[in-house]
Amino acid sequence: MKEVVILSGKGGTGKTSIVGSFAAIAEDKVLADCDVDTADLHLLLQPTIREEHEFWSGQVAIIDKGRCTRCGLCQKLCRFNAIKDFKIDATLCEDCSFCSRACPFKAITMKEKLAGRRFISDTIYGTLVHAQLGIAQENSGKLVADVRRQARQIAESKGVELIISDGPPGIGCPVISSLSGASLALLVAEPTLSGIHDLERVIGVCKHFGVPAMVCINKYDINKENSRRIAQYCSESGVEVAARIPFNNIVTEAMVHGQPVVEYVDGTISREIKKLWGKVTSALDQSIK
């Protein structure tokens, strides 16, 4: 089975727009949105939810008022100031469980908490597995792994050999979770100073985990000098620049209409994305060989 994950060193590079176009172009695939902190692929693909599953992760302290003697020890010991007036502030609680261990009357217990939800949905482009982490919740890396595992199971059950994953931005735990074991990483960068810096970091992560990578410079013509610097860095790093896509407001217009740009209009942008997908499929075939 082949899996391509689309990543970016920072948010707002156009990663999800490219994933949506790949979804429209590719045949016989399963789609996975691994950007669980700010999931938005569903806004573009307009899925119909078929299944919904709760995601339980982490713990939160609960005070039993019947046992609590209001001695104040828990409030005194909590380093995160999460206990006030003998109530737990779940947004401040770091799930360390120290208060439950320290309470002499066993009035505090740790209970697993609902951290988010995972969905299996139908789109006109195929099955989409996506999720939404709850507000101020953690363990997004664990939820990403859950999304990928479900996508793989669906692909295996349908005899599909391709998974396209919309990965999270950055280089943190969710990125590592979405990248490990992937066949290929497509890195979408924009020609800004922060874009160059973050691309260098995410290339380093790919190399660390031994995942082949290729780069797409999106909106390359807004700063051609920075685009040249990206291309030079990629050349020195042995990473192919697979596409240079120009800036065009038609991409935003397509998003407003809830369509991938390759479905919305057959223009320069659509042709460049189709060429990019051709290079991605060739690289996937090489990675399997």
Image (tube, rainbow, N blue to C red):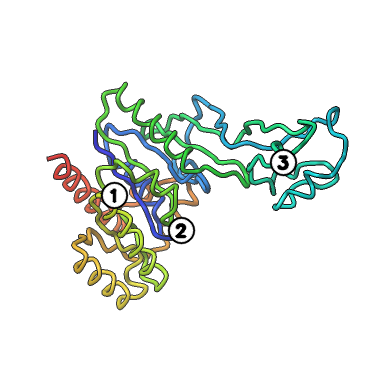
Residue at the image position 17 percent from the left and 44 percent from the top: 287
| Residue 127 sits in quarter | top left
Say which element carries label 2: loop
Say which element carries label 1: loop
- Residue sitting farthest toward the bottom: 225
Residue at the image position 85 percent from the left and 45 percent from the top: 85
Say which element carries label 3: helix
* Residue type, label 2: Gly
The label number, if any, that marks residue 209 in the structure image: 1
Residue in the foreground of this view, choosing between 158 and 237: 237
Residue at the image position 52 percent from the left and 47 percent from the top: 37
* Residue type, label 3: Cys
The vertical placement of 137 against 276, above or below, is: above
The vertical placement of 74 against 266, above or below, is: above
Residue at the image position 53 percent from the left and 27 percent from the top: 52
Q: Residues within 10 Å of mark 3 (few under 14, many from 20)?
A: many
